[in-house]
Amino acid sequence: MHRWEAEFEMLDTDRDDVITRDEFLRYCDQTFGPHLKVAIKFIKSQADYDRECYHRQRLDLNFVLGLVPSPAELPDDFAQTMSQLPLSHLSHINMAEYANLVVMPAADRSLEDIFLKERPSEAQVIDMIKQVAAA
């Protein structure tokens, strides 16, 4: 039995060969729980979004963060909700224009953290760039 077949059997609690929304949400709670930290990348252009997804699916996950499953279709009130998203000093940006998003596991540190706190040498930076290019 393939892994996903076993997962499906666990999800389908009422054994009707259909996974309901409630069954899926219960599975997500059990699998990821409230402790899964994610980064959401908002993308304005549909073409840029498509390109992002296409390339991330083909990269080596040993070097690049993969994507967390996200909804194929956004709720009807998404644009309205996003237009009200407060971004403090970036208040001039209308987030409703950024209707495409990818969800990734949150990294343990950002590039800025690495640069400012770890202060990598030029050789280390070159090595990191080579690792990203190899992915």
Image: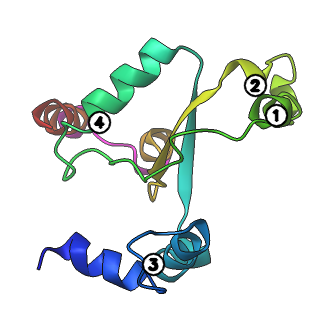
Marks 3 and 4: CB-CB under 8 Å? no
Q: Nearer the viewer, mark 1 or mark 4?
A: 4
For badge 3, the amino acid type reads Thr
N-term-proximal mark, 1 vs 4: 4
N-term-proximal mark, 2 vs 3: 3
Q: Is residue 87 above or below residue 37?
A: above
For badge 4, the amino acid type reads Arg
Q: CA distance from mark 2 to mark 3?
A: 30 Å
Marks 1 and 3: CB-CB under 8 Å? no
Marks 1 and 2: CB-CB under 8 Å? yes
Marks 2 and 3: CB-CB under 8 Å? no
Q: Residue at x 10, y 35 (%)?
A: 134
Instruction: Provide residue 37's location: percent of width, then percent of height.
Output: 55, 63
- Which residue in the protein does label 1 denote? 87
Q: Residue at x 25, y 35 (%)?
A: 125
Q: Which mark is residue 95?
A: 2
Q: Residue at x 75, y 25 (%)?
A: 95
Left or right: 95 as drawn, with respect to 102: right
Instruction: Provide residue 28's location: percent of width, then percent of height.
Output: 51, 72
Q: Residues within 10 Å of mark 4 (few under 14, many from 20)?
A: some
For badge 2, the amino acid type reads Met
- Which residue in the protein does label 4 denote? 56
Q: Residues within 10 Å of mark 3 (few under 14, many from 20)?
A: few
N-term-proximal mark, 1 vs 3: 3
Q: CA distance from mark 1 to mark 2?
A: 9 Å
Q: CA distance from mark 1 to mark 4?
A: 27 Å
Q: Residue at x 49, y 77 (%)?
A: 27
- Which residue in the protein does label 3 denote? 31
N-term-proximal mark, 3 vs 4: 3
**SS assignment at label 2:** helix
| Front-most of residues 90 and 116 | 90
